[in-house]
Amino acid sequence: MEALMTARYRTLLTVGGVLLLACLGFAALDHLLQEVRLRDIRAAIHALPSAGLLMALGLTVISYVTLTLYDVLALRIIGRPLPYRTAALASFTSYTLSHNLGLSLLTGGSARYRVYSAAGLSAADTARVVAVASITFWAGVFSLAGLMLTVHPGAPLLTGIGLPSSWLRAAGIILLTTVAFTVAFAGNEGRVLRLYRWSLPLPGRAQIAAQIAIAGVDLAAASAALFVLVPGATIHAFPLFFIGYTLAIIAVLVTHVPGGIGVFEAVMLTALPATNRPELVAALLAYRVIYYLLPLALAAALVAAQEGWRWRKPVTRTLRGAHMIASGLAPVMVSALVFMGGVVLLVSGALPAVPGRMRILYDMLPLPFLEASHMAASLSGAALLVLAGGLYRRLDGAFWITRALLLAGAAFSLLKGLDYEEASVMLAIAGLLQWTRPAFYRRTMLTADALSPGWLATVAIALGLSVWIGLFAYRHVDYQSDLWWHFAEKGDASRFLRSSFAVAVMLAATSVWRLFRPATPVGDAHPDESPSQPALNLATRTDANLALTGDKRFLTSASGRAFLMYQQRGHSWIVMGDPVGAREEWSDLLWQLREQADAAQGRMLLYQISAEALPIAVELGFQIAKYGEEARVDLSAFTLDGPAARPLRYAERRAEREGATFEMIPVAGVPAVMRGLQDISNRWLDAKGHKEKGFSIGRFDPAYIAQCDCAVVRHEGRIVAFANLWKTANRSELSVDLMRHDDVMPYGAMDFLFVHIMGWGKEQGYRWFNLGIAPLSGLEARRLAPLWSKLGALLYRHGESLYGFEGLRAYKDKFSPVWEPRFVAGPQGLSLGRALIDLQALIANGPTPGRRGGPLRLVASSGRRLAAG
């Protein structure tokens, strides 16, 4: 819990830092453009030469083709080569997203993972690809920057802050020396970097040379795509230009501002002080469209076309499982396009309308209608920013609302100023969204998880961009209070003020609603409320009787010969034990529940599964952790003879001498003694200071107890201890659930009770007696063991004062059992910890899942059956 709170605070600090840096970037940009007018920039845009635009487009193609080689080379370095088509798709989509949205590890990394996981790579391998690709990029940056500083150290951005040219040349030589030393250190075969259990193969000399060459071509082409758009630029000025471009890219990567908006432009304006400002701004805007937005639109179109066909193929539609879902890039790409569409509408609302178009509208429509359309278009853009997060999470509600808003945004764009360019963009995005309709399948409430702090920060930056553009466009208009209420044909500034205020109010209200609205637990629509009797008849383990406790839901196979029992707590779907019934139907049941949990944005946890279910857990992609060991007694070999059974013989004989007698009460006779059993249970709970638990253990509920035979110990005719029995229909196993007793009873009465239950089971032909789990038993604290095993082993050995871990195992060892491992399987990373917290709350049946000491109570409550005695 403490780790989760730390991660949350770290996230909030990161978001706050990004917002602060974005504000500083806008402030710097505003200062640099203090004397620039919007009309000058428009004139410069129209003056851009067609040849320069075509050259920039060609260089962009070269850059992105080279970018695909980052992943091709990285896959070879880690020893997991894939076809070029797969690597290119992962690289292209990853870089188009990270270029436009920033936060490269989150946006670009998730896109890579979706492609590579579908191709069979693990999350660790994907992380290695990202790491090697990042090394490739920085190798190119250091190499080219070092070369440029050495050859031409007079960069205005650096010399302007007082750095002498000699220092800059020395820095370039140091960079080149560092690269040369790295190449020499790598050797011919490369090395392996190890960090705890994670390893990263480092390339050899030839591969490092290939990395530098690839990154060099990419950076040279990317920077040249902007260079050819800058008016008056000559080839001799390229080294100085490249240094400024490199610093701008580094600033973008360090600040994590989405798309580097404001930061990149501010650095480039500072790096090129001699260039005409309006013409440089026009070049930067054209570069952002060509190098950023066009590739994003192309990537989204390619992915949407591919995903649309894939979802529509009959064979593919029959597939189930996480691999099908993980490979869906359409939601990621379409959500990025929708976000950009929202930015387009906001920026359009912040800019003055084209006068000729407005005159046409004034002749056709009343002024209030135009004013309302202008504000509605801006509000639609703001809503699209928010809804893009819901599309990313594949929410069907986000799909329906977004489609309507895109169509409305297209209509409002035409009605507010005949902006057919914006309307065409909205319609194109709406078409791609409709084509990928099946990818948005999650039926849950939009606001539950879509509006994360990071997403709200990105939305705030986009809104800040549109407001800054509006303030820049109307900086020649003197602010007056009556501007808010000024309605006129040329009232562009008033429209901007009103629409910006309305958008800010809407986003603020959305944020407040998100912050104060309680999270709604997710769930499936039609769970089974009772277990399948045919499946219970096929059960080979007595823990199938947990289905009778009345606190679970069930997912039953079509044949009715198998089911799994589960319950939901928060966003966790927790399965209790192995599925019950026909073994061949287990896999399908677990995959079905996995898909339901994923569709509802939940996480799935398998609790106390046996080794028999481990292969399925591995196929589900879960993290496996040993939980403890279960004690099972072979009743055919059980005897009180021999030295090992001496403590049991002594306890039995002494209890008999003190007047203890054993009785097995069948189901039909249990209601007659129910009141006495409940009194014993209440006194036992009061004496122990316990309260009833659930899920992994039964509770004293007369409706539940009445379904079981009960073994009792009588003293002078009065019941002083009891245990309700769990049995399997095929007599493969016998066990007990609740074991409760009075404070005053014969010595060794519980040993007496177990000995006689086992003897009775042996006479009835049962094969095994299950003594339950010893939590944390059998965990190894070796140096290379997982962290869970180390912590569990430490708690097992030194936590006796908190819970009798070793004492519980020692007690069960008196019966000479066979010990079998039990496991927990769940999602990777922090999600597993969150699921375990929800599990603790589910077992304890408490209102707050995050109470202190929860994990220990989770362990303690799971040593069921003998732990209660």
Image (cartoon, rainbow, N blue to C red):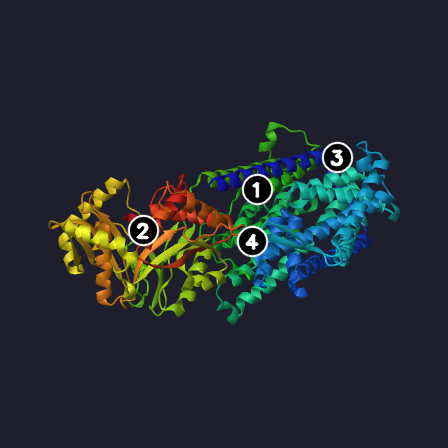
* Disc 3 to disc 4, C-alpha distance: 37 Å
What amino acid type is highlighted by mark number 1?
A: Met
* Disc 4 to disc 2, C-alpha distance: 71 Å
User: If you read the primary sequence from the N terminus, does the residue marked by circle 3 or circle 2 appear first?
Assistant: 3
User: What residue is shown with label 3?
Assistant: 32
Q: Are marks 3 and 2 in contact (CB under 8 Å)?
A: no
* Disc 4 to disc 1, C-alpha distance: 16 Å
Q: Do the residues labelled 4 and 2 touch (CB within 8 Å)?
A: no
Foreground pick, 14 / 311: 14
Neighbour tally class for label 4: few under 14, some 14-19, many 20 plus, Cα within 10 Å: some
Residue 74: where, in percent of width, then height?
68, 58
What amino acid type is highlighted by mark number 3?
A: Leu
**Residue 811 badge:** 2
**Residue 375 badge:** 1
Q: Which residue lies furthest to the top in this view?
A: 480
User: If you read the primary sequence from the N terminus, does the residue marked by circle 3 or circle 4 appear first?
Assistant: 3
Mark 1 or 2, closer to the camera: 2
Q: Which residue is at 56% across, 43% downward?
A: 454
**Residue 407 badge:** 4
Residue 446: where, in percent of width, then height?
47, 49
